[in-house]
Amino acid sequence: MIERYTLPEMGEIWTETYKLKTWLQVEIAVCEAQAELGYIPAEAVEEIKAKANFDPKRVLEIEAEVRHDVIAFLTNVNEYVGDAGRYIHLGLTSSDVLDTALALQLVASLNLILECLEELIQAIRYQAQQHRNTVMVGRSHGIHAEPITFGFKLAGWLAEVLRNRDRLVRLRENIAVGKISGAMGTYANIDPRVEAIACQKLGLDPDTVSTQVISRDRHAEFVQQLALLAASIERFAVEIRNLQRTDVLEVEEFFSKGQKGSSAMPHKRNPIRSERLTGMARIIRGHVVAALENVALWHERDISHSSVERVMLPDTCILIHFMIKEITDLVKHLLVYPENMKRNMNVYGGVIFSQRVLLALVAKGMSREEAYTVVQSCAHQAWNTPEGNFHDLISKDPRVTQLLSPQEIESCFDPQQHLKNLDEIYQRLGI
C-alpha cells in the first residue's frame, strides 16, 4: 500500500522485518516444543534462542541466488546460530512457517482493527446521544418520506458497526490457526504433539485438517469480512456526501482553517474525506474476488495464492485501518445544521405528514381508498410549485374539514408523533 494511506501501527505489522520476526518466532516455538518432547536437546534450544537473528538485507541477498524466501531466511539465521542451527526447521515444510506466521500477522491486524472500532463506536454513540431529538426528514428512494431524527440515523450506523465488531471477533477465532504438519499435512516427519505445543505457545489453535497449507477459505473469509466493514463505512460516507450537497446542506465535513476546496473555485467546500472512503471501499471489495480465487488451489497446494496475498492482505488491512480512523475523526468533528434540516423537512408545506392525515381520515370513517385519493391530490398539487403548501390545501379541503377539526389537522403535522417510540430503539442499543 502507498505511504499516503499507511498509518504507522498497521504499517509496522506488514513490514518485512515484522514478517521475518514472526517466522523466527514460529521456528523457535517449534524447537521449544520438540525439546519438551525430547526430540532435540534443551541446551540446543537455549543456544538457538540466545543467538538466533536475521538481517533482512542479507535474506534478500541470499534469496536472489537461491530464489526461495524461506531457505534464504533459514540460511541467514544459521549464520548467526552456528552448529545448533541443525535443529531448526526439523520435519517442517516452508508453509508450516509461512502460514503459521501469517496467522500471527492477521491476528495482530484484527486486534488493532477491533481496538480502533471501539473508538468509532464511542464517537457514533456520542453523536447519536447529542442528536437524539434533532428532527430531520427521512428519505426513501432519495425522496422525502417522513420525519426521523439525525440521532436515529446515527443509531442505525452504531448498530451496524456493532454487528461488524461481533463478526470480526468470530473471524479472529477462525483465522487464529497454525499448522506444523509437514509437507502434506500428514505429520509424516513430525509429531502432532509438536504442533499442539507450538501453536499453544503462539496463541493459536492447530488447523483441523491442513494439507501443505492452511486452506484458503479462512483467508477468503478474512478479506470478505473486512470488505463488509468497508462497505458499512462507505454507506456512512455516502450518506454524509448526500447530506452535504449544496441544496441539502444538513451536515458537512469539518473544513479547517486554511483548507482549500478547489484550485479554480474559491467557494468550494467538498466532502473529500467521505469521497476518499468511498474509493477505498472499492479497492477492498476488489480484493474479495482475488481472495475467493485463492481458495481453489491444485491438489494439496500450489503457489498461485502467494503473489496475490503479498498484495491483497497488507493492502486490505492497511486500508481498512485507515478507513476506520478516518471515519472516526469525521464523525467526531461532523458539522450538523438543525435549522437546515427543519427547512428541508417543511418544504411544500409538510407533505411528509401525508400518512398522518390519511390515517386520521380513515379513523373518522372515510374509506382508505378515498382518503388516499384526497391526500394524494393535495400533496401533488403542492409538489414542486413555488406556492405549494400541503398544510394549507388540507386545511381548506372540504372533504377533510368535514371530518377533522383544525386542532386534529394540526396534530397530524406534529413531527413528535413520528418519534414517540425512539426511546425503545435507543434502549435496544443501550444508549
Image (cartoon, rainbow, N blue to C red):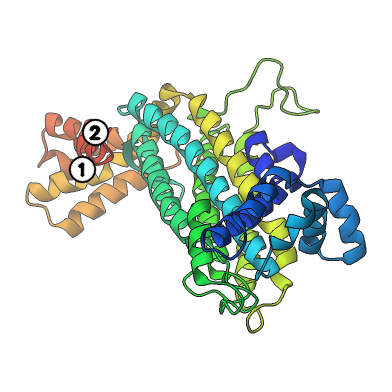
Task: Tell me, for residue 357, which label it has, or none.
Answer: 1
Q: Position of residue 63 (x, y in %)?
A: 87, 60
Q: Residue extending furthest left?
A: 365
Q: Does any portion of residue 370 appear in the rendered image?
A: yes
Give the vertical position of 32 relative to 398 (above or below): below
- Whether residue 282 appears in this view of the structure is no
Which residue is label 2 attached to?
413
Q: Residue at 51%, 52% (x, y): give it.
A: 201
Residue drawn at x 57%, y 28% is 253
Is residue 373 rendered to the left or right of residue 312?
left
In front: 131, or 206? 206
The answer to whether 418 appears left or right of 53 in the picture is left
Rendered position, 210 above or below 2: below
The first of marks 2 and 1 along the sequence is 1
Callout 2: 10 Å neighbours few (<14), some, many (20+)? many
Which structural element holds mark 1? helix
| x, y percent for residue 93 | 68, 70
Residue depicted at 62% across the width and 34% down the height: 271
Kind of element beneath mark 2? loop
Could you tell me residue 179's position as x and y percent? 56, 66
Q: Is residue 41 above or below residue 155?
A: below
Give residue 211's position: percent from left, percent from top. 59, 77
Depth check: give the residue in front, 287 or 59.
59
Label 2, label 1: how far apart the Cα atoms are? 8 Å
Count of numbered badges drawn on the protein: 2
Numbered tag placed on residue 212 in the rendering: none
Q: Quadrant of the C terminus?
A: top left
Q: Amino acid at mark 2?
A: Phe
